[in-house]
Image (spheres, rainbow, N blue to C red):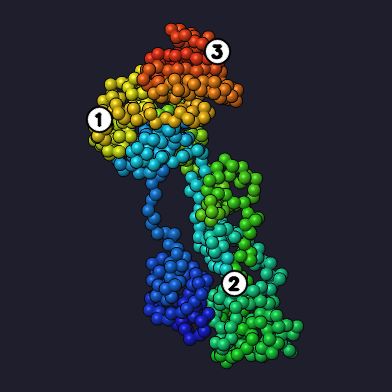
Amino acid sequence: MKKPADLSGPLPEKLIILQQMPAAALSDCKNKYMLSMCTCILCACSLQYSGIQRKKFISAAFPQSTVLCLLHTAETEPDEKKEEIMETTYVCGHRNPDTDSIVSAMAYASLCNTLGDNGYIPARLGQMNDESSFLLRRFGFQAPMLLSTVRTQVRDIDFDKPPQLGTNVPVSHAWEMLQDNPAINAITVTNEDGTLYGMITAGGIAESDMHAIHAPILHDAPIFNVLSALEGHIINSDDDVFDSLSGEVVIALPTPGECLRGVGSDSVILCGQQSDVVEKALAIHANCIILCQSDLAEQYRGITSQTCIISTPLDAWRAARLLYQATPVSRIAARKEDLVCFHLDDFLDDVRETVLQSRYRSYPVLDRENHVVGTLGRYHLLRPKRKRVVLVDHNEIGQSIPGLDQAELVGIIDHHRLGDVQTGYPVFMRNEPVGSTTTIVATMFQEHGLMPGEKLAGLMAAAIVSDTVMFKSPTTTPKDRRIAERLARIAGLDLDALGHEVFSASSADKSAEVLLGTDFKEFHLADHRIGISQITTMDSGHMLKRKQEFLDVMEKMKEDKKYDMVLLMITDVLLEGTQLLFLGDQEIIRQAFPDSEVHDHGVFLRGVVSRKKQMVPALALLWG
């Protein structure tokens, strides 16, 4: 049975005793100590009680100035229940997004979140065009997040989040944590700002311990660490102050003749009931005397000496071994410079390559500020958790987000032809022959008995007007007009006025390269690879004044991307047709549109306003 705690010693001893007192005794503790911040943190980390018990003790036992730091340091217990975080699902439109792609992603994410499937986030795969930017500002929405890839990253895997140690924590505490958590291979050691200092393992501790057998020397071990490891207390006068211990560790056994022969002042001497050893050690001014299971403590209590005298209930052999474990973990930890680290944004493919070329069992994981967030091992790479994705307004890999093959495809909502996206498992898919994906999403709102808010309804109406070119596109259906009118009524808008706002929003003063890339799509028809850009405007004549500028950029695109043909559709809402500029085989355009006159890389196609329904099918018909 343990002896009652003795609180009569000086400040360092009281700290160690408080660390080892049972929780019940702590609740009645009336002693309050003005300790340094580092001491408080050490004490809070060492307490082996529940998080609630720690907080109660800290608030009662320490000054208010240290409470916030301690409450942050006293981490919650690993077995406490934590609120489960809903999985994130990204709702993505196609690359070079148009208004329908942006708005249908936002609307579908809103619908899912409203129905309780939280975690749906709308995303865009490129910069928005002027029309989309104008409409989002018009109805008071922020642009969806820009997503560049859904390749699996370190942040997607369930890596370990073991406790972290400060640089001054004793090795003994690190060893206890590793023994109490067999699943943990290593523990990260962090600087005060949370950045990585190094990593400590059971093997590293064992190696250091074996080295101490051949070189039994203690180097600047903090006195608090020593007292904690030995469960001891200093018996010197309160006026004697000791910060650390150093010297050769000597166990003084009873011997005939003079004791401590050959032992110098730079020594830490362990003895039992040998008063002659104590007197000789005091005479040679040894750095420290450790009284092991000895009654001599009372004889020397309160002595003033430059030699630190410690009393411990441990035997000499065990005390000698534990002395080395009082060393701060920073002394034996593998330093950051010698470790392989990964960041949350690193791609798992790259991580695997690095892991295969290294020999470590555990790797620190850092965030963008280089703060330690956890560790990962080889087994974490076996079954990574993939990002969840819903595709809207497209279903072709060439138009979708990079890394789709590494993601978990949850669903597809589209109004285009079926493309080449494949899955190894069933997914939710909704594909309807309507003029806008937003029409489909609005229908899903109705089917669930829901109605979008006034601002979202106005934005959705604008997206339908945009994608159906004010209902003049051949892809337009009565359902598109009916849904758009219902949404306009909810938002209190006039559709005709809204249409003029939509198509007046484009900025014609941008560079030809930007205008061509804003709504550009790539298609593979038989063995032909073509790129088609579309600009919808209410003044095609103004655009045609820049014809040569467009053709020059198209020529460069054709050469760089090895396209067989590049087309620019300048669709005029008022003329209800398209001024087509093209580079490639002129005969193909003549055969595809025999009723139109082709000249100088251009042709006006009356009634042609849809890339999906008119342009692509006409070319596909020629090429099979």
**Neighbours of disc 2 within 10 Å: few (<14), some (14-19), many (20+):** many
Residue under label 3: 585
Vertical side of 291 occupied by 37: above or below: above
Residue under label 1: 486
Residue at left offset 68%, top offset 73% = 217
Q: Find the distance from the CA under tag 1 to the CA under tag 2.
A: 75 Å
Q: Is residue 260 among the parts visible in the rendering?
A: yes
Q: In the displayed structure, does residue 556 sit left or right of residue 106? A: right
Quadrant assignment, res 334: bottom right
Q: Of helix, strand and loop, which one carries label 1?
A: helix
Q: Find the distance from the CA under tag 3 to the CA under tag 2.
A: 81 Å
Q: Of helix, strand and loop, which one carries label 3?
A: loop
User: Mark 3 or mark 2, which is nearer to you?
Assistant: 3
Q: Of helix, strand and loop, which one carries label 2?
A: loop
Residue 281 lies, in percent from the top left, at 67, 87
Amino acid tagged 2: Ala
**Neighbours of disc 1 within 10 Å: few (<14), some (14-19), many (20+):** some
Residue 91 lies, in percent from the top left, at 40, 37
Amino acid tagged 3: Asp
Amino acid tagged 1: Arg
Q: In the displayed structure, does residue 17 sit left or right of residue 99? A: right
Q: Is residue 524 among the parts visible in the rendering?
A: no
User: Mark 1 or mark 2, which is nearer to you?
Assistant: 1
Residue 309 lies, in percent from the top left, at 60, 84
Residue 18: assigned label: none
Residue 597 lies, in percent from the top left, at 47, 8
Residue 326: assigned label: 2
Q: Are marks 3 and 1 in contact (CB under 8 Å)?
A: no
Quadrant assignment, res 444: top left
